[in-house]
Image (cartoon, rainbow, N blue to C red):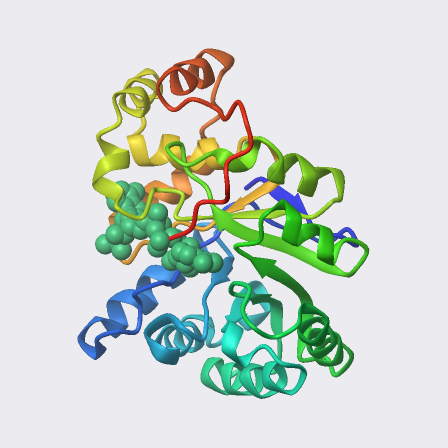
């Protein structure tokens, strides 16, 4: 498994697992828990969740998935902007810890920018770090101008939408984050509406060259730079296996050119795409 360096030198797997839409239906609980555990066994030991997903339900799934193996897993969770006051982040974090039955979150992100002043949120995050309740903090859905406001702080990641059909971050946000040693986390690396991604002739033709699948090409593409952590979500065990297999897929210059010809890299600044 490739790894990505966090500020401070700790390395985390370049390939993790998402949890959006997990925890919505109790009938799916064991399937979702088993999918995450399978992913951990296959090396995808970073799990991304959020208090927003299924109103805390996804964090409860994470609790079951990491039970007995907490030390092996790097947990990322996110606070909703409406809870991101100095005091609000602390109570939201306590609730998340309780739901996940753990005493710390490895990386705690502001889900997107809201009405609370960023300085207050950062102060709340720092207090949580001092108390040992989180190990790192970061942001999500921040464009380059937002990142300028956290420059010089301990911000340790920016989680943004990134897949072959949405690659505007390559123009300035990704280079900015690389220059400042802040890893980017690629969310929805399969495009969220996965059918469209899997039907991409460019991805399919690269997949054919490698005896791989279009999903594996999309995931391998997202982590190709060494600065990006990708978090595909899969509740289907076959999908989990496939995604984990993407770690072994190295795309060649020809493969990248094939993808570029259809999914063109940005030639100018475009505002950050969100889901
Ligand atoms: N920070 C943010 O604002 C933000 C926004 C969106 C997402 N996220 C995070 O990023 C994670 C991933 O994004 P996402 O869930 O939006 O979308 P995604 O990972 O791009 O796609 C998930 C969909 O792809 C399917 N899938 C997974 N692996 C597959 C494979 N190998 N072949 C075919 N289909 C496959 C899944 O089906 P099954 O589940 O049936 O396997 C699911 O329907 C989220 O779960 C969440 O943790 C963060």
Residue 129, quarter of the rendered image: bottom right
Tally of numbered tags:
0
- Looking at the image, residue 199 sits to the left or right of residue 245; the answer is left
Residue 29 visible in the current orientation? yes
Q: Give percent across and percent down for residue 166.
A: 41, 36
- Looking at the image, residue 258 sits to the left or right of residue 138; the answer is left
Instruction: Report the front residue among 25 and 175.
Output: 175
- Looking at the image, residue 161 sits to the left or right of residue 75; the answer is left
Looking at the rendering, in which quadrant would you find the N terminus?
top right
- Looking at the image, residue 152 sits to the left or right of residue 40; the answer is right
Please give the name of the residue rendered at 58% of the width and 65% of the height, measured from the top-left corner: 109
Q: Give percent across and percent down for residue 155.
A: 71, 59
Spot the residue most to the left.
27
Q: Give percent across and percent down for residue 83.
A: 54, 80
Q: Give percent across and percent down for residue 237.
A: 27, 53
Instruction: Report the front residue among 128 and 87.
Output: 87
Q: Is residue 262 above or below residue 92?
A: above
Please give the name of the residue rendered at 21% of the width and 30% of the height, measured from the top-left corner: 199
Q: Is residue 135 above or below residue 204?
A: below
Please give the name of the residue rendered at 73% of the width and 58% of the height, measured from the top-left corner: 150
Residue 239 visible in the current orientation? no
């Amino acid at each position: 498994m490739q790894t990505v360096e966090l500020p401070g030198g700790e390395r985390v797997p370049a390939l993790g697992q998402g949890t959006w839409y997990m925890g919505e239906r109790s009938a799916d609980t064991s399937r979702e828990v088993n999918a995450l555990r399978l992913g951990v066994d296959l090396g995808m030991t970073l799990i991304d969740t959020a208090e927003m997903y299924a109103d805390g339900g996804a964090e409860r799934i994470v609790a079951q998935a990491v039970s007995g193996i907490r030390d092996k897993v790097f947990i990322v969770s996110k606070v909703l902007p409406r809870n991101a006051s100095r005091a609000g982040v602390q109570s939201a974090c306590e609730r998340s810890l309780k739901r996940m039955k753990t005493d710390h979150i490895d990386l705690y992100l502001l889900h997107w920018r809201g009405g609370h002043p960023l300085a207050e949120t950062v102060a709340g995050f720092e207090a949580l770090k001092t108390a040992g309740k989180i190990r790192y903090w970061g942001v999500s859905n921040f464009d380059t101008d937002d990142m300028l406001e956290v420059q010089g702080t301990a911000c340790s990641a920016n989680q943004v939408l990134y897949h072959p059909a949405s690659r505007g971050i390559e123009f300035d946000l990704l280079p900015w984050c690389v220059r400042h040693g802040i890893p980017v986390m690629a969310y929805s690396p399969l495009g969220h509406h996965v059918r469209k991604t899997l039907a991409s002739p460019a991805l399919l033709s690269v997949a054919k060259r490698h005896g791989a699948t279009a999903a594996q090409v999309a995931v391998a593409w997202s982590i190709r730079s060494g600065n990006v952590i990708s978090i595909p979500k899969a509740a289907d065990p076959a999908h989990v296996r496939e995604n984990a297999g993407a770690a072994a897929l190295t795309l060649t210059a020809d493969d990248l050119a094939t993808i570029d010809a259809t999914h063109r890299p940005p030639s100018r600044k475009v505002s950050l795409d969100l889901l």
